[in-house]
Image (spheres, rainbow, N blue to C red):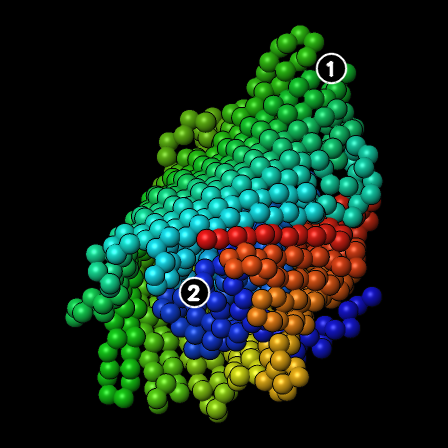
């Protein structure tokens, strides 16, 4: 049944009052009105959301705790227009999509440092971007739409910024030490987690250490076929184990400046019994007896930052800079035991490794000045990073009868690299001016960024042996990305905002130089040194209203994309060539358009009897087309909305929150599965039961509804016999207990 509240949710909203838990810094309470919340990502300056010319979401620590956010999918649970896919086999959380664009076209960064790319090839190799422990964060900011003018190539679709905790978040006047612990449980994956945070401070020095650990099993779905084989719909058995560390040491030589040394790392291991791949395999005529996956992911970051609040120089009033190194690595081992088509017992061992190491520096400066009646805030700076990328697949096949070992594991002859060891260098200069006119009734925000991108593949014997005669290509690209935004406070609490932003994405290393040859199956992939950058033009127009009782923001957007890079385009086939040849090509012109709404109502502002009651809602409708092929884009989510009713007192509160989606309507292929619309209710509660002690509790999918998220099922056929494999969990509970001193 299609949810009846979807259209109604467009006009109502809930602004939940700030309520700091024991784990939430005492000074991190968020203004009850979203439009008053401060964002930094949208303009690289601290501005209230009401003063920025584009749509941005800010999710603070209190909200993360209150909504029991565990992973990226939980993070955007109530954020229509932003979605996160998840796999059903062994690889879990996938990419973040903003307004229909995802993958490496969305920049994800932690404290200004980009998270590693994703890379996937074949059935046993999938490096995702789920590298951040959300318990180490104090805030998440999501900028919707192209942001290349401030953040460069990776921000074609938008930006997700993770901001980690600082010592000052826990140390108030007269308090020079803090210690807190947090324990939790989540039934949908039998997950247990615990964490501890300690902070100390003095006149000049302060520090913070935060550690956490998680462990659990596979995430439930609503499939009930538990057999081993292709018809299995229940989740594959898994075990998860993860841990993280965040340490910061801050030295403040004066009240106006701080040096900040950060060491951060996280590690996760997942073991999977891939039961749905057991049995007879028609493509190889072999029978898989067992298939196990052992996946390991690590990220470590070292950075030194310097913030100066009062520089008092002709070129800047304030500045911040940082230098950093970050290492990210994904290693995936697959062990398969099978009976071959000839009846031989065989053990196959495959290894996949994706390693990305980056060093970089950035500096941002701010200068305020006046020209006549105009007030200016000039923001400018430099970004530089150098990244080394390594990827390799290796493996062997062992005949269990004779013990003979071979590196030929069809269709590969190991070891192989799908692109050569490569080094990329990205450097950029950006400048932005925020111009205030008519006593700040009008705010103009022009800006421009110049990026230079260099790709330098290295001599790689492994790649050369697998791709004879192919010479990897160098790439050098320079791009200029302008933007212009405006905010007009035209009547009391009403304002209009508009924004134009140019976006671009450099040709990625794996598309430029992706190559492998498979003689057994008669195909090859060749590099394309002539790829052009992907570009976009993004337009946004919206209206906002902010009063003590109501917050409202409605925006329409139109994004046009040119020269989309599509991997695996057939460029030659027999009899024209001996093999079927694939290559990445600039093939697509695309357009994505939509409308987004957020609103909040504080009912107590209208009547004393309603004191403590509030509403919140958000909604998104978007539509997109591949203009080259004249067909709908598969990445576009159906219309979605969230709606909640909450009651809050000083020490406790409760909320009934709903998530809604329409039936998926426009599909590029009628044979694809179109998930039905749904409405799912969640119950959230929080209670500060003692000084420095709090409980957060949630029941998700309260009515135990069977439903599918479109971001999880793209490409699944409507005739599939295992559709229930892709369902979201049924009724589940989650809770956390936090105490602090």
> Residue at position x 43%, y 77% from top?
51
- Looking at marks 1 and 2 on the same chain, the residue that comes earlier in the sequence is marked by 2
Q: Name the residue at the front extreme.
A: 690
Q: Name the residue at the top extreme.
A: 402
Judge by depth and name the residue closer to the eye, 587 or 337.
337
> Residue at position x 71%, y 76% from top?
7
> Residue at position x 73%, y 15% from top?
344
Viewer-side label of 1, 2: 2
Circle 2 packing at 10 Å, graded few (<14), some (14-19), many (20+), is: few
Task: Say the numbered circle drawn on residue 27.
Answer: 2
Is residue 145 at least partly visible in the picture? no
Q: Is residue 701 left or right of residue 200?
A: right
**Residue corresponding to mark 1:** 344
The image shows residue 279, relative to residue 670, as above or below, that is above
**Which quadrant of the figure has residue 603?**
bottom right
Q: Position of residue 625 (x, y in %)?
A: 63, 64
Element type at mark 1: loop
Q: CA distance from mark 1 to mark 2?
A: 67 Å
Q: Position of residue 567 (x, y in %)?
A: 56, 47
Element type at mark 2: loop
> Residue at position x 72%, y 26% from top?
290
The image shows residue 413, relative to residue 543, as above or below, that is above
Judge by depth and name the residue closer to the eye, 371 or 203.
203
Q: Position of residue 681 (x, y in %)?
A: 73, 63
Total marks placed? 2
Q: Is residue 14 left or right of residue 454?
A: right
Circle 1 packing at 10 Å, graded few (<14), some (14-19), many (20+), is: some
Q: Position of residue 240 (x, y in %)?
A: 61, 37
Quadrant occupied by the N terminus: bottom right
Task: Say the numbered circle drawn on residue 574.
Answer: none
């Amino acid at each position: 049944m299609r949810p009846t509240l979807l259209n109604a949710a467009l006009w109502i909203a809930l602004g939940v009052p700030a309520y700091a838990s024991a784990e939430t810094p005492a000074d991190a309470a968020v203004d009850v009105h979203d439009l008053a919340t401060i964002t930094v990502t949208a303009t690289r300056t601290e501005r209230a959301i009401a003063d920025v010319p584009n749509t941005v979401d800010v999710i603070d620590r209190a909200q993360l705790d209150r909504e029991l956010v565990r992973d990226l999918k939980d993070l955007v649970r109530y954020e229509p227009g932003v979605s996160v896919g998840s796999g059903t086999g062994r690889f879990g959380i996938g990419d973040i999509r903003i307004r229909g664009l995802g993958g490496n076209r969305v920049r994800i960064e932690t404290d200004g440092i980009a998270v590693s790319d994703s890379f996937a090839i074949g059935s046993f190799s999938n490096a995702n971007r789920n590298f951040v422990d959300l318990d180490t964060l104090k805030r998440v900011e999501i900028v919707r739409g192209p942001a290349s003018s401030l953040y460069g190539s990776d921000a074609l679709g938008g930006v997700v910024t993770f901001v980690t905790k600082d010592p000052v978040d826990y140390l108030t006047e007269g308090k020079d030490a803090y210690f807190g612990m947090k324990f939790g449980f989540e039934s949908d994956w039998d997950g247990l987690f615990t964490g501890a945070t300690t902070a100390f401070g003095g006149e000049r020095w302060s520090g913070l250490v935060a550690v956490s650990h998680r462990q659990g099993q596979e995430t439930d779905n609503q499939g009930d076929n538990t057999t081993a084989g292709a018809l299995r719909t229940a989740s594959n058995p898994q075990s998860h184990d993860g841990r993280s560390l965040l340490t910061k040491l801050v030295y403040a030589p004066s009240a106006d400046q701080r040096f900040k040394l950060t060491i951060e790392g996280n590690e996760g291991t997942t073991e999977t019994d891939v039961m749905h791949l057991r049995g007879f395999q028609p493509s190889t005529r072999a029978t898989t007896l067992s298939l196990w996956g052992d996946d390991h992911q690590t990220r470590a970051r070292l950075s030194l930052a310097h913030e100066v609040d009062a520089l008092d120089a002709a070129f800047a009033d304030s500045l911040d800079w940082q230098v950093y190194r970050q290492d990210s690595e994904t290693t995936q081992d697959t062990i398969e035991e099978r009976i071959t088509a000839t009846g031989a017992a065989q053990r196959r061992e495959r290894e996949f490794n994706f390693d990305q190491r980056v060093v970089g520096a950035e500096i941002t400066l701010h200068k305020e000045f006046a020209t006549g009646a105009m007030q200016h805030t000039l923001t400018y700076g430099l970004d530089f990073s150098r990244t080394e990328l390594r990827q390799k697949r290796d493996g062997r096949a062992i005949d269990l009868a004779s013990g003979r070992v071979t590196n030929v594991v069809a269709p590969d002859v190991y070891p192989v690299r799908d692109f050569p060891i490569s080094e990329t260098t990205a450097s950029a200069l950006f400048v932005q001016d925020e111009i205030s006119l008519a006593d700040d009734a009008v705010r103009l925000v022009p800006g421009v960024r110049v990026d230079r991108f260099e790709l330098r593949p290295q001599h790689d014997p492994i790649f050369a042996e697998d791709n004879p005669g192919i010479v990897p290509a160098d790439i050098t690209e320079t791009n200029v990305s302008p933007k212009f935004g405006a905010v007009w406070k035209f009547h009391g609490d009403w304002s209009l905002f508009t924004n134009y932003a140019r976006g671009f994405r450099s040709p990625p290393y794996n598309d430029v130089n992706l190559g492998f040859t498979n003689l057994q199956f008669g195909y090859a992939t060749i590099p394309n040194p002539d790829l052009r950058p992907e570009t976009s033009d993004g337009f946004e127009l919206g209206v906002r209203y902010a009063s003590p009782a109501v917050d409202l923001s409605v925006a329409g957007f139109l994004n046009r994309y040119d020269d989309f890079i599509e991997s695996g385009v057939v460029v030659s086939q027999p009899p024209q060539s001996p093999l079927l040849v694939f290559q990445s090509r600039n093939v697509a012109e695309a357009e994505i358009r939509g409308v987004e709404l957020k609103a909040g109502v504080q009912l107590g502002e209208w009547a004393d009897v309603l004191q403590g009651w509030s509403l919140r809602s958000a909604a998104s409708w978007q539509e997109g087309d591949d203009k080259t092929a004249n067909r709908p884009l598969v990445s576009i989510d159906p219309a979605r909305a969230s709606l909640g009713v909450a009651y809050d007192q000083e020490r406790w509160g409760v909320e009934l929150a709903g998530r809604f989606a329409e039936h998926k309507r426009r599909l590029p292929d009628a044979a694809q599965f179109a998930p039905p619309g749904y409405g799912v209710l969640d119950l959230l509660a929080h209670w500060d039961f003692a000084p420095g002690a709090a409980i957060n509790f949630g029941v998700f999918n309260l009515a135990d509804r069977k439903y599918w998220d479109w971001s999880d099922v793209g490409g699944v056929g409507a005739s599939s016999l295992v559709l229930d494999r892709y369902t979201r969990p049924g009724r589940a509970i989650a809770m956390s207990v936090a105490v602090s001193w």
